[in-house]
Amino acid sequence: MSLENIQLTITLSDPQLDDKERLQEDTQNILSEIQEFDGVQKADLMPIEKAEPGSKSIGGFLVGILTAEINAKNIKALVGYLGNNLYGKTIKIKAEGNGRKIDFEVRNLEDLKKALAEVDSFLNA
């Protein structure tokens, strides 16, 4: 695969957390970290205009959802970083690039290992 940018949609959820304001605060904290991550071209909260029916929002953004654009060579590091730093939360990631799509969910270390293998396959296909 060429080193074109990959579009990510990252959805956070926490089964221990019912408070959407707290989840959005966590999402904004992760957004700040992702914006500083090597290879990230841009990252932002998901605007409400892209909402699916039944989605929750706060202040014009979807709760717990952000988007990022990252270069292909850094996607595996970002997925590993998210999996390691968001332990206890569920992370759903959809990636699109070079005409292909993958999506996976990480809840624990076993899921993270599978996700990293999927990213390898995605990049090497």
Image: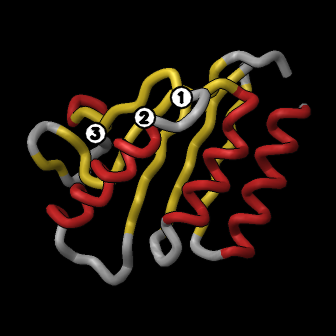
Q: Quadrant of the N terminus?
A: top right
Amino acid at the residue labelled 1:
Val
| Res 35 label | 2
Q: Residue furthest left?
A: 59
Q: On the image, numbered disc 3 is attached to which residue?
A: 51
Residue 42 position by quadrant: top left
| Res 40 label | 1
Could you say which is closer to the camera, residue 53 or residue 123? 123
What is the secondary structure assignment of the residue under circle 3? Answer: loop
Q: Are marks 2 and 1 in contact (CB under 8 Å)?
A: yes
Q: Give coordinates of residue 84: x percent, y percent.
A: 60, 65
Scheme of colours in the image: secondary structure
Q: N-terminal of the two: label 1 or label 3?
A: 1
Q: N-terminal of the two: label 2 or label 1?
A: 2
| Relative vertical location of residue 87 with respect to residue 77 in this rendering, above or below | below
Residue 45 position by quadrant: top left
Q: CA distance from mark 2 to mark 3?
A: 22 Å
Q: N-terminal of the two: label 2 or label 3?
A: 2
Amino acid at the residue labelled 2:
Gln
Q: Residue at x 59, y 32 (%)?
A: 38
Q: Give coordinates of residue 29: x percent, y percent.
A: 31, 52
| Left or right of residue 74, residue 46 in this image | left
At label 3, counting other C-alpha atoms closer than 10 Å, the crowd grade (few under 14, some 14-19, many 20 or more) is: few
Q: Are marks 2 and 3 in contact (CB under 8 Å)?
A: no
Amino acid at the residue labelled 3:
Ala
Q: CA distance from mark 2 to mark 1?
A: 6 Å
Q: Residue at x 60, y 27 (%)?
A: 39
Which callout, 1 or 3, points to the residue nearer the camera?
1
| Left or right of residue 66, residue 22 in this image | left
| Relative vertical location of residue 107 with respect to residue 32 in this rendering, above or below | below
